[in-house]
Image (cartoon, helix red, strand yellow):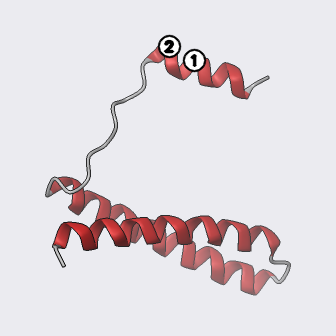
Amino acid sequence: MEEKVIVNDVLSSIKSNLKDYGKVIAETANMELRQTFQNLRNSSESFEYELFKLAESKGYYTVSQKATQDEISKVKKEISL
């Protein structure tokens, strides 16, 4: 399997796991268990960022264009309603 495919697959998996951690954390009443999930999420976020930087540097992952100020203002307005 090509390195690019593997890297992008791992990035996709981590992003999915991060969503799941958020759901689990919000539903966990036991503070010790909650902290464990928060630590796992934080470690996963750090790993995802490092892998993202590697993928971007190798041209495996391209960042979308930055939003214009008008687009940002529009979204802010929609969210604040």
Q: In this view, does 53 lie to the left or right of 34?
A: left
Picture coordinates of residue 7 (x, y %)? 27, 69
Give the position of the C terminus as an image quadrant: top right
Residue 48: image quadrant is bottom left
* Residue drawn 63% across the image and 70% down it: 20
- Give the vertical position of 27 relative to 78 (above or below): below
* Residue drawn 70% across the image and 23% down it: 78
Disc 1 target residue:
73
Mark drawn on residue 70: 2
Residue 4: image quadrant is bottom left
Picture coordinates of residue 29 (x, y %)? 85, 78
Q: Is residue 16 left or right of residue 32?
A: left
For the image shown, how many numbered marks are present on the structure? 2
* Residue drawn 19% across the image and 79% down it: 1
Amino acid at the residue labelled 1: Ser
Q: In this view, does 63 lie to the left or right of 77?
A: left
Q: Which residue lies furthest to the front in this view?
A: 1
Which is nearer the eye, 10 or 53?
10
- Give the vertical position of 64 relative to 57 (above or below): above
- Badges 2 and 1: C-beta atoms under 8 Å apart? yes
Secondary structure at numbered mark 2: helix
